[in-house]
Image (cartoon, helix red, strand yellow):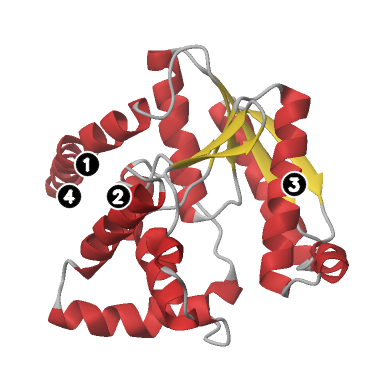
Amino acid sequence: SVFFIILFYMTKKSFNASVLPRMRAFASRLIGRGDAVLVGLSGGADSVCLLHFLRYLSSEHHFALAAAHINHGLRGKAAAADQRFCRELCKKLDVEFLTLKTDAKKTAARFGLSPEHGARKARYDAYLKLARQWGANKVALGHQLDDQAETFLLNLLRGTKAKGLAGIPVRRPLAAGVEIVRPLLCITRAQTEAYLKNNDLPHVTDQTNFDDAFTRNWVRGKLLPVLETKQPQIKQHLALIAADMEKLAAGN
């Protein structure tokens, strides 16, 4: 009906007015004219939001853009389906698509890491290889405010020195000439999902995200919601503490 069409565009306008300026200002500190940016694209909500947003921003700020999808060799047909989804999305957005298959189990065994940390190392090694191949000076990843809060709590639960509470850095060197940047650390997971809805963007869901056997999933699904009942702004508060700890760790 006309009413629902009007309501949709009012909601979209409201989202754009309240969130997009913050996203643009934050990203503009990390990415500028002449950069070559490789976006880590898993197909999940955050990475799709990031790719679409940077695709929009690239024409305004004049930087090159491509997407990198890493297949960890862990999820068989599901991983192949995610790769196809990412390839098709890039085709629709007219973004160059790069992909690499890694062996996360082999990496974990070789370096004596847990499966989770083995996959992480394999992924970052793959990002660097593709960045070198394509000529990127920046790798943009889709971590957002919820990830920051979860990481802070995870490190606290595991036991860490103060430096460990710095959480996820907004930017850090990956290797000589290549920097990791995280343009979505200024918004929440709910806001990335709202961005997708407002722009009619599909995404894929990794079912392992709901398995409480993984501590991060327990923090996300159980601990944070309990804390939010006492303090609705807990994610923002934890993110601010993490940012302060990062500055202290850097000696600022």
Residue for point 51% across, 47% down:
47
From this view, report whether residue 107 is shown above or below residue 155. Answer: above
Q: Which residue is under mark 3?
A: 125
**Label 4 or label 1, whichever comes before in sequence order:** 4
C-alpha separation, residue under disc 2 versus residue under disc 1: 8 Å
**Label 4 or label 2, whichever comes before in sequence order:** 4
Secondary structure, mark 1, is loop
C-alpha separation, residue under disc 4 versus residue under disc 1: 22 Å
Secondary structure, mark 2, is loop
C-alpha separation, residue under disc 4 versus residue under disc 3: 47 Å
- Amino acid at circle 3: Asp
**Label 4 or label 3, whichever comes before in sequence order:** 4
- Callout in the foreground (4, 1): 1
Q: Which label number is shown at residue 83?
A: none
- Amino acid at circle 1: Val
Residue 113 lies, in percent from the top left, at 75, 71
Secondary structure, mark 3, is helix
From this view, report whether residue 200 is shown above or below residue 233. Answer: above
**Label 1 or label 3, whichever comes before in sequence order:** 1
**Label 3 or label 2, whichever comes before in sequence order:** 3
C-alpha separation, residue under disc 4 versus residue under disc 2: 27 Å
- Amino acid at circle 2: Ile
Q: Which residue is under mark 1?
A: 19
Q: Which residue is under mark 4?
A: 4
Q: Given contact means CB atoms under 8 Å apart, are the residues at marks 4 and 3 in contact?
A: no
Q: Which residue is under mark 2?
A: 187
- Callout in the foreground (4, 3): 3
**Label 2 or label 1, whichever comes before in sequence order:** 1
Residue for point 74% across, 65% down:
118
133 left or right, relative to 235? right
